[in-house]
Image (cartoon, helix red, strand yellow):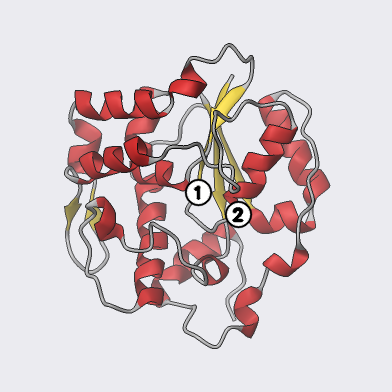
């Protein structure tokens, strides 16, 4: 069984990577403290290859028609296969990988690996954009957008873009959607869902309740109008 995590940086994906590792799933090697497969440079370059096929329409709208109709470039496939070498070459029965930048190339990952187990991981965007992440500036990965110079706004656009990119393709054959907050406050039931989905026992790890709702004590801007629709869909309460 092959597994991957689709989720933006700072969405709590380290918790599911550590959970899978504790459950005997080989997550590649080496890993950093966040459970990301290293070295990441091949994945980063694959993101830049992918971005060339994305058309920006303005006003935080992107057209993924080229992405979803073109033949996947051989260069992209090679980069992904080289990045995933330790995983794909492993004889482990259950294996997978996690790195947030996988989300930036998700449509082509879904086409290259249509039969694997996808875990879609989300977090309240108001918490997700409080800390810095490498994907805060989409332009670093070649993605066109209206950069504002406002760090929080650019992070928010990055969150939105990664929601849009997942929506741009049909749901894969195997898909499980998990909210980080449910892993924190309803871990037993969440682990049961993951175990049923993967068909293997899932271990519990320590989760920190104070990682939820941090935006409530934040003095900066953490809410943007374009969050509202997704927040309602994901079950987050609007204040």
Q: Which residue is drawn at 54% across and 72% down?
A: 126
Relative to 3, residue 151 above or below = below
Please state the total of marks drawn on the protein image. 2
> Residue visible at 49% across and 26% down?
173
Q: Can residue 54 be seen in this view?
A: yes
Q: Name the residue under label 2.
A: 12
Q: Residue tagged by mark 1?
A: 7
| First-in-chain label (2 vs 1) | 1
Report crowding for label 1: few under 14, some 14 to 19, many 20 or more residues within 10 A (C-alpha).
Answer: many
Label 2 with label 1: CB-CB less than 8 Å: yes
Q: Where is residue 202 in the image (x, y as percent from the top left)?
A: 77, 33
27 relative to 60, above or below: above
State the SS at label 2. loop
Closer to the camera in the image, 212 or 194:
212
In front of the other: 172 or 113: 113
In the image, residue 154 lies at what x, y percent?
34, 70
Task: Sort mark 2 into few (<14), some (14-19) or many (20+) by Cα contacts within 10 Å.
Answer: many
Residue 67's quadrant in the figure?
top left
* 26 left or right of 200 in image: left
């Amino acid at each position: 069984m092959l597994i991957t995590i689709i989720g933006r940086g700072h969405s709590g994906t380290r918790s599911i990577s550590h959970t899978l590792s504790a459950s005997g799933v080989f997550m590649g090697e080496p890993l950093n403290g966040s459970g990301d497969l290293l070295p990441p440079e091949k994945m980063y370059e694959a993101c830049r290859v992918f971005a060339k096929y994305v058309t920006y329409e303005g006003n935080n709208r992107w057209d993924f028609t080229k992405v979803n109709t073109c033949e996947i470039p051989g260069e992209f496939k090679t980069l992904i296969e080289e990045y995933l070498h330790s995983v794909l070459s492993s004889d482990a029965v259950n294996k997978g990988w996690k790195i947030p930048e996988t989300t930036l190339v998700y449509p082509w990952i879904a086409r290259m690996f249509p039969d694997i187990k996808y875990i879609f991981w989300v977090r309240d965007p108001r918490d997700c954009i409080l800390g810095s992440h490498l994907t805060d500036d989409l332009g670093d990965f070649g993605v066109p957008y209206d950069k504002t110079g406002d760090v929080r706004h650019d992070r928010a656009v990055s969150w939105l873009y990664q929601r849009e990119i997942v929506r741009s393709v049909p749901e894969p054959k195997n898909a499980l959607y998990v909210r980080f907050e449910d892993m924190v406050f309803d871990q037993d039931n969440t682990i049961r869902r993951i175990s049923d989905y993967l068909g293997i026992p899932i271990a519990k790890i320590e989760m920190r309740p104070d990682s939820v709702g941090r935006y409530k004590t934040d003095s900066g801007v953490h809410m943007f109008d374009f969050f509202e629709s997704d927040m309602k869909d994901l079950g987050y309460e609007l204040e």
